[in-house]
Amino acid sequence: VTYPNPTSNTLNINWMSASIDVSTLRLVNINGITVYQHNVSGLGQMEQKLDMTSFAKGTYFLQIGTGNSNTMSQTIMKN
């Protein structure tokens, strides 16, 4: 779950981690370039805040991968 979307400042990211494995958050721009990547360790309900003020307006794709699970992807709009 991400909010607010669209965003101009801080993007709140919440997800459930079913294992203690490292979760990788990746923000990819419309050209397929990774503009942000961060690893987070933990188990259960996870939360991360991402400062979007330095990113250009446009469409981004948030990808969250945890352990061996498939990567979840969500479209994020920056205004």
Image (tube, helix red, strand yellow):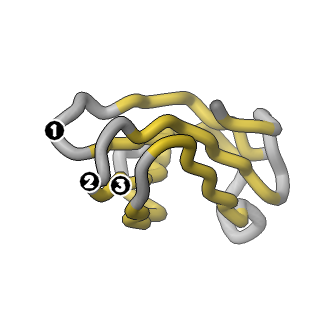
> Where, by quadrant of the figure, is residue 31 drawn?
top left
The image shows residue 69 at horizontal and vertical percentages of 22, 32
Q: Which mark is residue 55?
A: none
Kindly identify the amino acid type of the residue bearing the numbered disc 2.
Answer: Asp
Image side of residue 75 versus residue 30, left or right: right
Q: Name the residue that disc number 1 marks.
A: 68
Query: Mark 3 falls on what kind of element?
Result: strand
> Where, by quadrant of the figure, is residue 64 drawn?
top left
In depth, the one of 69 and 63 nearer the eye is 69
Which label's residue is closer to the chain start, 3 or 1?
A: 3
Distance (Cα) linking label 1 and label 2? 9 Å
Q: Residues within 10 Å of mark 3 (few under 14, many from 20)?
A: some
Kindly identify the amino acid type of the residue bearing the numbered disc 3.
Answer: Thr
Distance (Cα) linking label 2 and label 3? 10 Å
Image side of residue 41 versus residue 53, left or right: left
**Disc 1, disc 2: CB below 8 Å?**
yes
Nearest to viewer (mark 1 / mark 2)? 2
Mark count: 3
Q: Name the residue that disc number 3 marks.
A: 24
Distance (Cα) linking label 3 and label 1? 11 Å
